[in-house]
Image (cartoon, rainbow, N blue to C red):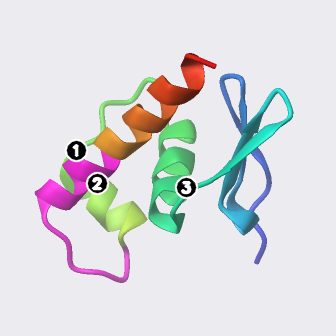
Amino acid sequence: MLQPVVRVGEWLVTPSVNQISRKGRQLTLEPRLIDLLVFFARHPGEVLSRDELIENVWTRNVVTSHVVTQSISELAQVAQRRRRR
């Protein structure tokens, strides 16, 4: 099933192709980062625990809280780099 395009601030997230785009520029991210970004977008303003993220984003994998922290850090780095452009 194709997921619809999701707007996150200025970004358009297209989960079906693992891409985010803004101002005509596209960036392909790892599927887990796209899933994490979409989950955050669907829960604006909510404080989400690592357990909630693991349960909802990494549904078929066994992961540690370190993996969640690393993924959030990677998303933050992508956002930071793109903000400078």
Please determine whether, in this image, residue 77 is positioned above or below residue 39.
above
Which residue position is annotated with label 3?
A: 34
Residue bearing mark 1: 49
Q: Secondary structure at mark 3?
A: helix
Is the residue marked by circle 1 packed among few (<14), some (14-19), or many (20+) residues within 10 Å? few
Residue found farthest to the front: 85
Residue that appears at 37% across and 75% down: 59
Asked if one can make out residue 44 in the rendered structure from this viewpoint, the answer is no
Q: Nearer the viewer, residue 13 or 84?
A: 84
Residue farthest to the top, as pictured: 84
Which label lies toward us, 2 or 3? 3
| Image coords of residue 56 (percent x, y) | 39, 63
Question: Which amino acid lies under the numbered mark 3 shown in the image of this protein?
Answer: Ile
Quarter of image, res 18: bottom right
Q: Nearer the viewer, mark 1 or mark 3?
A: 3
Query: What is the distance, in whole Å, between disc 1 and disc 3 at their CAs?
Result: 18 Å
Mark 2 element type: helix
As rendered, which of 83 and 59 lies closer to the eye? 83
Instruction: Please say if 45 is above or below 3.
Output: above
Place of residue 19 in the rendered image (x, y in percent of width and height, measured from the top left): 69, 54
Check contact, mark 1 vs mark 2: CB within 8 A.
Answer: yes
Q: Upstream in the sequence, badge 2 or badge 3?
A: 3
Q: Which residue is mark 2?
A: 52
How much space separates mark 2 and mark 3, taking CA atoms? 16 Å
Magenta segment boundaries in residue numbering: 59-72
Query: Taking the image as drawn, is residue 5 in sight?
Result: yes
The residue at the point 24 percent across, 54 percent down is: 68
